[in-house]
Amino acid sequence: MQVFNVPKSIKKDCTFTFCAGCDHGVAIKLVAQVIDELNIQDRTLAIASSGCSVLLYNVLDVDCIESPHGRGCAVATGAKRAFSANGKDNIVFTYQGDGDFASIGLAESMHSALRGEKITAICINNTNYGMTGGQMGPTSVLNQVTTTSPMGRNEQYHGFPIKTAEQIALCDGTCFSARVALYDYKNIINAKSAIKKAFEYQIKGLGFSFVEILSSCPTNWKLSPQDSHTRIKEELSKIYPVKVFKEK
Ligand SMILES: Cc1ncc(C[n+]2csc(CCOP(=O)(O)OP(=O)(O)O)c2C)c(N)n1
């Protein structure tokens, strides 16, 4: 697999404007490769949300709606149901941050999974609210220093982080839930195969499919790109295991 080949479904004249070392670029290219390989570019609708993930619509050459923060799965539900009611087999996926998917939008996300909506959700877990300046998010780990937890996340005061892929796997309407990482080539290949499976589950109409991607945020973590990947490998993937939690 040529990870850095530019897929057809990436806009020809696009510029990636993510921070240096951010994993969004790789994540979007993997999604684009999957869209190309499944030959679904002309019937795919992407739901980008508030946060760094919104930049998806600048680079991905598919129809795209920007949803309000947290409402990605609700907007995707409406779109998918409207397509289905009109006899159309369009593919609908969300591309959301962890603050979006698992905090402000947790009700929308989880109830979409419980209802078994035939959509795919991709959640970029960078353990903070990235675009707004690195505030503590639902996935910030214990002791993590953020702009709103300068002494580190404290379990007594802030509570515990959410294990999103595990929680979504518990929903009966979920057909596929996995967590992946992008810190090395092997993980990138596995990430692509999980994204592909999630889309294939939607094509088969089996329910809600979900991929959580552990992703670097060098700017807000105040680490180099290399050290950010080391953090994912040595710290985050121990707290957030990289695995498939549910596959029907
Ligand atoms: C309803 C609403 N509340 C708050 C905001 C402000 N806001 C924009 S982006 C963002 C943070 C997004 O964090 P996350 O979803 O984790 O995505 P990231 O930027 O880290 O990719 C917030 C709070 C908003 N746009 N809309």
Image (tube, grey):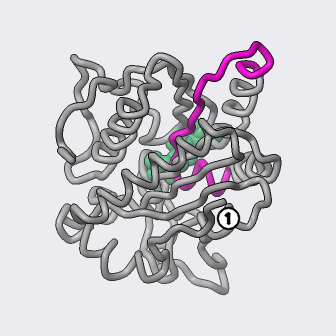
Say which residue appears at 44% left-offset and 76% top-offset: 144
* Magenta highlight range: 82-104
Residue 23 coordinates in the image, percent (x, y): 30, 52
Say which residue appears at 63% left-offset and 70% top-offset: 166
Q: In this view, does 79 lie to the left or right of 64?
A: right
Picture quadrant where residue 170 is located: bottom right
> Is residue 247 magenta-colored?
no
Instruction: Report the residue that reaches farthest toward the bottom.
Output: 156
Residue 125 coordinates in the image, percent (x, y): 47, 59
Q: Is residue 207 left or right of residue 220?
A: right
Q: Is residue 248 left or right of residue 23?
A: right
Q: Does the residue labelled 1 lie within 8 Å of ligand 1?
A: no
Is any part of residue 82 visible from this angle?
A: yes
Q: Quadrant of ligand 1?
A: top right
Classed neighbour count for the residue bearing mark 1: other residues with Cα under 10 Å, few (<14), some (14–19), many (≥20): many
Counting every numbered tag in the picture gives 1
Q: Element at badge 1?
A: helix
Q: Which amino acid is tagged 1? A: Ala
Say which residue appears at 71% left-offset and 19% top-offset: 83
Quarter of the image containing the C terminus?
A: bottom right
Residue 238 coordinates in the image, percent (x, y): 43, 83
Residue 242 coordinates in the image, percent (x, y): 44, 71
* Residue position marked by numbered label 1 in the rendering: 169
**Could you say which is closer to the camera, residue 39 or residue 10?**
39
**Could you say which is closer to the camera, residue 73 or residue 32?**
32
